[in-house]
Amino acid sequence: MSTHPGGRLTGRRIGILVENDFVEEELSYYQRRFAEEGAEVALLTRLWGQSSLRFTGHDRGAPVVVAGDLERLDYAELSGLSALVVPSGQVADRLRYSEDVDRLAPAVELMRRAFRMPQLVKAFSCHALLLLTAAPDLVRGREVTCHNNLVGDVRNMGAHYTDLDVVVDGDLVTSRTVEECHLLARTLIDRLDPPAAEAAP
């Protein structure tokens, strides 16, 4: 998808995690909206040694091919991203799988690296915080929102659930459901390029 030069996010790169049962409308919205602002969008997943993988969406079975390997995102690679988005659907649940129950899934290890980088905005939509249940320290004490089904989980993780559609806690942006994906995108854009009124001293 081509980017629009001169947008608020020109020169920025945003990563989006993908797995089977993603929400088609949400993913396509992020791709269009971020590209509209000039950002390059990189789709990322665990490739299991393959050069690319094909995933299908939850509602219509729409396909998407992903060639970005999240296991290759070391600190140097992550520094090339301005934001990392974990979308709704079953993406987080599938990516938290580890074949060795005594080791964290690669996507969770990725999040550990990402949360050590405050300049990198982390965004989670709906059920996406499931990805962090094996690393609760990443959100302990932080303000978040999520789908109603996850409220108990985030409280058990030590996070402070806030009954709002979108919550911003520094470099962490969370939204309640997939229906708020446009609000999540708008908030993320504003975090990366604050409106003039906010940017003024």
Image (cartoon, rainbow, N blue to C red):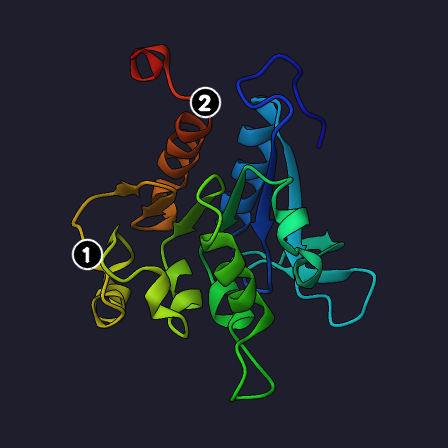
Residue closest to the far left = 163
What secondary structure is found at the residue carrying circle 2?
loop
User: Residue at left 44%, top 55%?
Assistant: 88
Image spot of residue 10 (x, y percent)? 62, 21
Image spot of residue 36 (x, y percent)? 58, 23
Q: Quadrant of residue 11?
A: top right
Residue 60 shows in this picture: yes
Mark 1: amino acid: Tyr
Mark 1 lies on residue: 161
Point out the image quarter for the N terminus.
Answer: top right
Whether tag 1 and tag 2 are in contact, CB under 8 A, the answer is no
Point out the image quarter for the C terminus.
Answer: top left
User: Residue at left 52%, top 37%?
Assistant: 29
Mark 2 lies on residue: 193
Query: Viewer-nearest of labels 1 and 2?
Result: 2
Q: Quadrant of residue 155?
A: bottom left
Residue 87 shows in this picture: no
What secondary structure is found at the residue carrying circle 1?
strand
> Relative to residue 156, is residue 42 depicted above or below?
above
Between the residue at mark 1 and the residue at mark 2, the CA separation in whole angstroms equals 26 Å
